[in-house]
Structure formats: C-alpha cells, structure tokens
Amino acid sequence: MTTLVETEERKALRSAVSALGRRYGRDYLARVAAEGRRPDELWAEAARLGYLGVNLPEEYGGGGGGIAELSIVLEELGAAGCPLLMMVVSPAICGTVISRFGTGEQKRAWLPGLADGTRTMAFGITEPDAGSNSHRITTTARRDGTDWIVTGRKVFVSGVDTADATLIVGRTGDARTGRLKPCLFIVPRDADGFGRRRIEMELHAPEKQFELTLDEVRLPAGALVGEEEDAGLLQLFAGLNPERIMTAAFAVGMGRHALARAVAYARERTVWKTPIGAHQAVAHPLAQAHIELELARLMTQKAAHLYDAGDDPGAGEAANMAKYAAAEACARAVDQSVHTLGGNGLTREFGLASLITASRVARIAPVSREMILNFVSHTTLGLPKSY
Ligand SMILES: Cc1cc2nc3c(=O)[nH]c(=O)nc-3n(C[C@H](O)[C@H](O)[C@H](O)COP(=O)(O)OP(=O)(O)OC[C@H]3O[C@@H](n4cnc5c(N)ncnc54)[C@H](O)[C@@H]3O)c2cc1C
C-alpha cells in the first residue's frame, strides 16, 4: 500500500460508511442535539457494522485494522453531516492505549465493549491551570496499600456523562528520583469522589464538555494502565497521535460537508443570468477550499500510515501537521460555504452557521494551532524556544 493512493478495501470502506452517514445526515444529528440526547442509533449501527472497532485487535472483537481505517470512518460520517465525536476518544485514544499497553485483564474488560460500541471511554488530560502546558498537570496519584488515591481537576473533557469510564492522565511520585511522572488511570463514571460539572458551550453537538474534580478517588491497583508505572509517557504518546489524526479526519469531514452544501447551492441559486457558481469570485474560493481539504487529507493519510506502521516519532510530526492543515482547511471551507449561501448561510434551516463555531474546535483541541507551530519550529526546524 502506498499512502498516496487508497487501496480498494479502503475505498470500499469509505463508500459503505458514506452510505450509512447519508441515511442519518445532518438533520439526524441536529435533532439529537436539540433533544439533548446521544446519537445512540447511529452509534449502534456503526458499531454493528464493525466501523467503530475497526482499529482494535480481532481477538477482542475489533476489525484488526488501524487508525487509517478508523479515520476514514470518522471523515465519511462527518462529510455526511453526522460525525461521532466520541470516536476520537473511545476507540482511537482509549482503545489504542489499552490494546497497546493495557494488562490482559484491562484488555478483556474493555476492548470487546469499545469494539462493539456497547461501552465508551472518555479521555481527560486538560487542566484549568495547565492548559496547553501539559507539563504543569497537577492531578496526582499516591499509593495506599495496593490502591491508588487520585486527586486533581480536569476541564473541557468530552462525553464524561455518557462514558462508562474516563481515562485520566495524572502523575505519580517516583520513589527513586522524587520527580512526578505521567500515568494513566481508568476512572469509572460513578467512582466516589469523581465529580463533574457541565460547561455550557456554544456548540450544537450531542457531546457535552465537563469540568471534573477528583477528590481522593480510591482506585484498585488494576485501574493503572499497564503493568508498570514507568511506561506512562509512552502510553500517553500512543494515545495522543491517534487523537490528532482523528481530529484531522473530523475537520476534513466537516469541511467537505460544508463545501458540498455550498457547491450544490451555487449550482442552483441564480440572481443574474447564470447560477452564482459561474462567478469566479464565488467559484474560486470553493475550488481553493476543496484543494486545501484534499491536501489536508493526504497528510492525514500519511500520519495514519506512519502510526499504523509503528513509527511513533514520524507519526508524531505528521499527525501534528495533518491536524494543523485540516483545522485550517476546515475553518476556511466552512467560512466560505456560509458566505456562499448569502443570508441563507445564517438561517437555522440551512444549518451551516453553527458550523462556524464547530469548525474552530479543531484549531483549539486537542492541541492548539500555535502549539503545533511551536512543535514544528522547535522539533522540525530546530529553532530556539521562547518558553
Ligand atoms: C469542544 C472541545 C472538546 C474538548 N474535549 C477534550 C477532552 O475530551 N479531553 C481533554 O482532556 N480536553 C478536551 N478539550 C480541551 C482542549 O484540548 C484544550 O482546550 C486545548 O488543549 C487548549 O488548552 P486551553 O483551552 O487551556 O488553552 P490555553 O493553553 O490557555 O491557550 C490559550 C491560547 O494561548 C495560546 N498559547 C498557549 N501557550 C502558547 C505558547 N507557548 N505559544 C503560543 N501560543 C500559546 C494557545 O494557542 C491558545 O490560542 C476540549 C476542548 C474543546 C473546545
């Protein structure tokens, strides 16, 4: 397989997911969000067809594929107007981390449910006083016998209300050096001391964001991901690269959705002699948006290919660049699409205006545009740091 041209299997996956997405579409997701519930029907059907666990190992009920396949699923659902945000966290981050680093018991407990969609897991790393600077994370875990006691705060964590558990990034004290090192804990939704408060967002999405408090949450030894604490950093990076690749796929899907709607409109809407799409001032920005989305997708495919091939450092750089390119392409495509519809671009009926806010998410999360530019400046270009 070359990363430049998709295999027949992947093309077939794309068109099958696209057909599923079109059966639900934007109206379905908008209705679900307005009713304040989850997109359970789409989630269950996508799971039954094997799409949600396509990246997870076959022995645990997954499809045995990789992030390349999972990102196709998310992109195509997004292009159809009904992206499933929890795919970014549940199968992509949590499923990957557990299948790569989890104990046998954790794999047996979680992977079959994550693969068949009956269980979901959220992912909490962001903290109010750390933000982009994850070195400042203060959620800490200490031992009490064989148990762990975890205390800290998280913010903007998606889907905690519906997820069976949240994979929490914390730190443990290193007995030898006294320094804190990262580690990941599986915290069940209803654990004692695990509180959540919904953050009202200007997003018309079924998935909600939460501020979390962990107040001396007692967890059994088996809640720590992996056999030993020392692998925390590796585990973290194993999850962060898929997160970036999936966010890129989310953004490309959303950009494609907006663009397709604008193109359909520009072909029909006539206020002079020809449809507005004949005016180059309308057509060229749409063509430009299409080119930028295609380029972003190509970088996303490269990042997924490197990640699935086991090249974590190579995937890290490519995943950052893909996320950056996709977020920028999505924001511009949505902006131009809304503009193409004139007044209708801002009506509820056409439903494009709400994408203006939604399209900004990929610029901010899971890592902001500036932090990617910092990464490329320092790591790729070797420029000095300002912070
Ligand atoms: C819809 C949504 C869903 C989310 N879901 C999750 C989730 O499920 N789990 C989770 O853990 N988190 C989640 N997040 C949080 C997200 O990852 C953070 O918002 C993001 O990492 C940025 O952190 P911050 O908001 O604290 O911004 P800050 O770190 O405060 O940054 C604010 C601004 O300053 C800039 N900045 C900061 N430092 C520098 C620097 N050194 N150089 C240049 N510019 C800089 C940033 O680029 C940004 O523009 C979600 C966020 C959103 C909006």
Image (cartoon, rainbow, N blue to C red):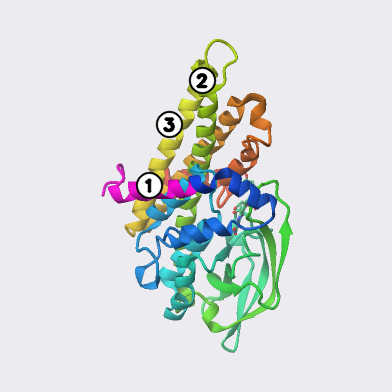
- In magenta segment, residue 289: no
Secondary structure under tag 2 reads helix
Q: Residues within 10 Å of mark 3 (few under 14, many from 20)?
A: few
Residue wearing tag 2: 277
The residue drawn where x is 59% and y is 70% is 164
Dots 3, 2 in contact, CB < 8 A = no
- In magenta segment, residue 14: yes
The residue drawn where x is 66% and y is 75% is 190
The residue drawn where x is 56% and y is 73% is 186
User: In the image shown, does 293 or 270 lie closer to the viewer?
Assistant: 270
User: In the image shown, does 374 or 263 lie closer to the viewer?
Assistant: 263
| Amino acid type shown at disc 3 | Ile
| Amino acid type shown at disc 1 | Gln
Residue wearing tag 3: 291
Residue 382, quarter of picture = top left
Secondary structure under tag 1 reads helix
Residue 200 shows which numbered tag?
A: none
* Left or right, 218 with reference to 86: right
Residue 347, quarter of picture = top right
Dots 1, 3 in contact, CB < 8 A = no
Secondary structure under tag 3 reads helix
Of badges 1 and 2, nearer the viewer stands 2
Residue 128, x across and y down, in percent: 68, 58
Which residues fall within the magenta stretch?
Answer: 1-21
* Left or right, 281 with reference to 227: right
Q: Residue furthest front?
A: 23
Q: CA distance from mark 3 to mark 2?
A: 17 Å
User: In the image shown, does 40 or 130 lie closer to the viewer?
Assistant: 40
Of badges 3 and 2, nearer the viewer stands 2
Q: Residues within 10 Å of mark 2 (few under 14, many from 20)?
A: many
Residue wearing tag 1: 301
